[in-house]
Amino acid sequence: MTKYIFVTGGVTSSLGKGIIAASLAKLLQARGLSVTIQKFDPYINVDPGTLNPYEHGECFVTEDGAETDLDLGHYERFLNIFTSQQNNVTTGRIYQTVINKERAGDYLGKTVQVVPHITDEIKRRMLSLGKDNRYDIVITEIGGTVGDIESLPFVEAVRQLQWDLPEENCLVVHLTLIPYLRAAKELKTKPTQHSVKMLSQEGVHPDIIVCRTEKPLNYEIRRKIAQFCNVKTEAVIEAADAPTIYEVPLLMVREKLDLICLQKLNITNYREPELGYWKEFLDRIKYPRTSVTVGLIGKYVELQDAYKSILEAFVHAGSVNECKVNVVNVHSEHITVDNAHEKLGHLDGLLVAPGFGVRGIEGKIVAIQYAREVGLPFFGICLGMQMAVIEYARNVLGLKHAHSTEMDKSTVDPVIDMMEEQKKVTKLGATMRLGAYPCAIAPNTLAHRIYKADLISERHRHRWEFNNSYREAFERAGLKVSGVNPETDLVEIVELADHPFFIGVQYHPELKSTVERPAPLFVHFIDAARQYSEKRSLQKVMGTAEGEMA
């Protein structure tokens, strides 16, 4: 039978439940077990698709077009497997299902209540990924913090499953915080004790306690936590702060988290963990041969989680190139024609990120013009690609008022326009063009050299598209359409041939980038930035030498 591991969190939010869950899954996978992870979020939104990134960070899109929590991105990056609609469940989706059943008369006149109807639906979804025994282990991350009123139905469902399932088929890992008081020079266990006590009062007893800490936990502290929280001392795990999230699996294998889980789940058929590639990946991150500085222009650059997948794709690409990628946030609202060189002249590459809305648009267009004219490697994703099209239309085609109908509905030259099927959409949630779609790549193009394939599949999240009425004019002027959807003829990739690296894509390549399978576009973009940096350094040396000779 499939085994189930539940990961809860206490004391404070943002402790890293998703990283602990993904790290544990990676270790179990490395031991030869088939594993998947799912996230249960306590908010009432049906999905995060309508949430502002400042509220909840990036909205991660799966192959099947589900708009999900950013933790699913961690799951995919660590495990190198695809997640789906089933892997992310919200309170909103649970209540929506139960209310629809009630309206259909499925409850035969019964009073619909949180217990048992809501908790039964939660349990059904918690167990659904393990129904056909596709996986040896299903790990479920419970969002929020123990004690939150929103999380109570999920915790109650876990309590019932601890009672429903055989003891060796169910395990609870509780992540907590051991704060260090600098004034007292002491680690404090009391918040952890209170957190576990609160969880126990709700009927759920953790089997393993993982302690986030900035200082090492000695044996006495572990023993104290074990004694007051009713677990074995070896089940108190230290989760020390790490320089990179990709180091956490190695920290956890050192702490034997995976072995303790296997023992408690009575799993005996496993091997030594195969982590050779993972260690090589980490070595390349820790000891790069060179470095580049890349500017990230986005609308939500103040919040790191808003562009989580892009930042992680830079890490993956940097490892392949043995290059440290220093990402500099650039506020496009502050970029003008007069200060573009001052703001961007120190960069080795420029990425214009996805987004929605009019704020900062003109600054993005100026930044793209600067990158195009000085030969700075440029990479545009979704909105970034659309802004590149607008910039080229205005400054090369001479269409001075070219724009997107998203920002200017009355523009005389709508080079970017809403997709035809999107014009009939009235509801915002889950109605964009979402998920994986094919893209046919033209031969003898930069895109073809990067992908080394005639047909690829990438994930999308957009309503606006390249207006094909202008396609011939763009191609005559030098902006090559190198990738299109073979079924709809929607433009997916544009590029410039007479530029070191200038490419824009309508899709989101960052969403499929993993440790073991880095996104090709990011790998080649960082390589182009590295070459640009080396060329500029050489020019400086040559200039200095010529000055000394003079």
Image (cartoon, rainbow, N blue to C red):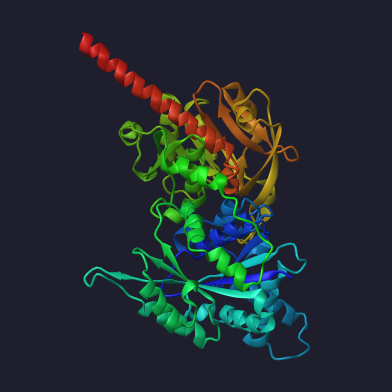
Residue at point 58%, 41% (across, down): 519
Tell me: 243 left or right of 249: left
Q: Nearer the viewer, residue 330 or 405?
A: 330
Q: Please, is residue 549 above or below residue 430 in the view? A: above
Q: Is residue 391 visible?
A: no
- Quarter of the view holding residue 287: top left
Tell me: 105 left or right of 272: right
Residue at point 35%, 37% (across, down): 336
Quadrant (top left/top right/bottom left/bottom right) for the C terminus: top left
Residue at point 70%, 50% (across, down): 421
Q: How many marks?
A: 0
Q: Nearer the viewer, residue 32 or 447?
A: 32
Quadrant (top left/top right/bottom left/bottom right) for the N terminus: bottom right
Residue 392: x percent and y percent? 51, 30
Q: Nearer the viewer, residue 250 or 427?
A: 250
Residue 205: x percent and y percent? 54, 82
Tell me: 106 left or right of 544: right
> As drawn, which residue projects farthest toward the top?
550
Residue 397: x percent and y percent? 53, 26
Q: Is residue 151 visible?
A: yes
Residue 495: x percent and y percent? 57, 29
- Quarter of the view holding residue 415: top right
